[in-house]
Amino acid sequence: MGKPASASAILLTKRPEIRDAIRQALKAEGLKAESITNSADDKDCIQKVARSEYSLLILDWEIGAEKIQSVLNQSRRASQLESHPVFLVASHEDENIVAVAREFFVTHIAIGEVTNEKIQTEIKGLVREYLNVSPIRKMLLSADAHRRQGNSAQALDILEKILDKQPDNQRVALEIAETHIHESDWDKALELLNKFVKRSDALPRIRQLYARCRLKQGDHEGAIAALKDAQLMSPYNIERLLEMGDLFLKIDQPSQAEAAFNQVLDFAAGSKEAKLGKSTSKLLQGEINEALQILQSIASPRELSAVFNTAAILAIRAQNFDTGMGLYQKAAQILANNNKLSARIFFNMGIGFVKQGKPDKGLKCFQKAVENDPSFQPAQFNLKVLITGQGKAGGSEAATPAKGAPVRDFLADFDEKLSAQLPMGDMLGSDGEEVELDDLFNDIDKVG
């Protein structure tokens, strides 16, 4: 079979017998040896996928559920509408693996006893899928190109034309809804999803996006119900379980959150995000030693401080002010040898005390923050405000830095974090990057 010169395949497996059989099957379908690359781990595979505009992707579930889903997620993000054709191999039969494959539109699967004949059959179908560019697929590829170039309006125009012709096409509806969400047009996304979400055959991701829309509207119970429905259809979806755990944390149900994170760890024992989420749940349940046992084995000092900070914010939001301050105090003790991180912990404590009408305690916290990191300008500003008496205890103007001041801060808008699906434990961004805040105290208002 003739193949275009640009054709390539990326393999992710550690099983030599599977790798050799797949390479032989690919060569039999016309791929050249140099166009078939092997990856030893998920990070290398993701890098190869990112460098390839369109390749065949062969994944071995035995690499690990979390790692395989990470590759599938990244592949889809790199090419939202028409991701790389995928062949998934698994050594044990499990319908939940098949359910994950369906969620990522994987059309070629071999599970259980994988024979050479079975591999050859699936590879033949995979190559046929690669070559068969149908009119609909051409339109999807065109829409994808527009969206990657930042032309969301053109992408939506193409997708909506497809949906007009195929009104039951959930995959296209899903892509339109995701585009609306990307453009922060939540109402349009919800209007479209409402047409599909109550159908018995609604895709799990339709329900997941619907949950995000409900969450954006403040309907926590509706969001949880939709996530649970989606999870029943596909229990091994890590992204959704993490989202569910974060949502339970948000509504002050830490034991339910821990159960969601434990579900991830049951089949993806190495999931760092699930461990960080579980440790946050433990902190909110007062099980500090148990949380530290988890964190000490996986977390950097900055990640540890971020987890404590997340738990403190959630405790304050739930009106458990003493619990929140206690978590900050514990974090300050643990980070006593890290002046920059402990300075930011004391800084947040100071903000909390001022907002609670306790400027004397806030003053001590800001003094400690400046002592630990004299270059930390927001702490110096707040300290000066309190010393000179420019702010009034408990008022919104107390200890407020100049408008638009760059602040390295642990406080975060938890609603937006959930919507954007950011990792649970790392609230700072890379290396404590500066964040522009119009009013530092807005964050305390959000969580208090």
Image (cartoon, helix red, strand yellow):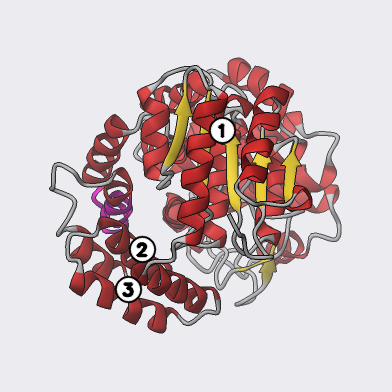
Marks 2,3: beta carbons within 8 A: yes
Marks 2,1: beta carbons within 8 A: no
Identified by mark 1, the residue type is Glu
Task: Tell me which numbered mark, 2 or 1, is placed earlier along the sequence.
Answer: 1
Q: Which residue is mark 2?
A: 175
Say left or right for 54 vs 33.
left
Identified by mark 2, the residue type is Glu
Q: Which residue is mark 3?
A: 159
Quick check: 366 above or below 261? below
In which quarter of the view is residue 158 placed?
Answer: bottom left
Q: Which residues are magenta?
A: 209-219
Q: CA distance from mark 3 to mark 1?
A: 31 Å
User: Residue at image x 40%, y 21%?
Assistant: 94
Task: Tell me which numbered mark, 2 or 3, is placed earlier along the sequence.
Answer: 3
Residue 423, percent from left and from top: 57, 45
Identified by mark 3, the residue type is Leu
Residue 37, percent from left and from top: 74, 46
Q: Is residue 116 visible?
A: yes
User: Residue at image x 63%, y 65%?
Assistant: 4
Q: Which mark is residue 66?
A: 1
